[in-house]
Image: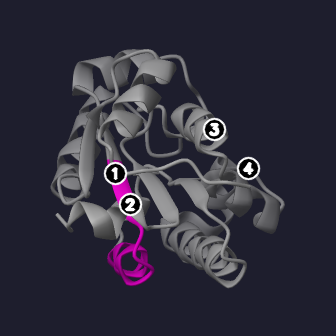
Amino acid sequence: MPPAGEIRNRKLICLAGFMGSGKTTVGQLLARQMGCHFADLDTVIEERAGLNIPGIFERLGEPGFRELEHESLMRILGEAAVRERPTVVALGGGTFAQPQSFAALRSFGCAVIWLHCPIEQLLARCATITNRPLFRDEATFRQLYEQRLPFYEQADFRVDGTAEPRRVVEQILATGHFEKVTA
């Protein structure tokens, strides 16, 4: 983990975690609380493709989706860097587990926060969701979680994502590593 002073100065905060961990909800609240710009990677991907995520998977397959995901991530990170705009980014559930995206997040100096939730809670949160192309059944859900877990564990910070979203934001801010931005 980098020294606190190094992280405090970072302008890019990325939320990583498995599907259902609350990245978008927490990210919006965190950005508002800090006075930062917010970007949801899945939304940017859908806007660029003109399709929803399941449609992209159907048309391009997972490799095509991952290519589009990486291009979209690079656009978000590049724009934030060029504009010197502090940004909170909600990553896709698999973004941090993709080697080229992982490397990009590190090269841009992003502070990556893992919203950790026990798999049982993630299953409960995702049970009624039908628009997740990689959630076919409980067995594949668990297998995918186990595959991604070693990547999530490499995040700069781990916070308990089981709490109400405002409490998760409070946990992030309570680390003392992130300051509000004066807009």
Residue on which disc 2 sits: 8
Q: Quadrant of the N terminus?
A: bottom left
- Residue 136 location in percent, x, y? 42, 35
Residue on which disc 1 sits: 177
- Residue 180 location in percent, x, y? 55, 47
- Location of residue 164 by image quarter: top left
Q: Which of pointers 3 and 2 indicates the residue nearer the eye?
A: 2
Residue at (42% x, 50% y) in the render: 178
Disc 4, disc 1: CB below 8 Å?
Answer: no
Which is nearer the eye, 134 or 162?
Answer: 162
Which is nearer the eye, 62 or 15?
Answer: 15
Q: Residues within 10 Å of mark 2 (few under 14, many from 20)?
A: some
- Location of residue 41 by image quarter: bottom right
SS for dot 2: helix
* Label located before the other in sequence (1 or 3): 3
The numbered disc on residue 28 is: 3
Residue at (31% x, 46% y) in the render: 114
SS for dot 3: helix
- Residue 35 location in percent, x, y? 67, 46
Q: Amino acid at mark 3?
A: Gln
Q: Which of pointers 4 and 1 indicates the residue nearer the eye?
A: 1
- Vertical relation: 171 (above or below) 157: above
> Is residue 100 a member of the stretch shown in magenta?
yes
- Vertical relation: 139 (above or below) 94: above
Residue on which disc 4 sits: 52
* Label located before the other in sequence (4 or 1): 4
Distance from Cα at disc 3 to Cα at disc 2: 19 Å
Residue at (59% x, 44% y) in the render: 34
Residue at (25% x, 19% y) in the render: 120
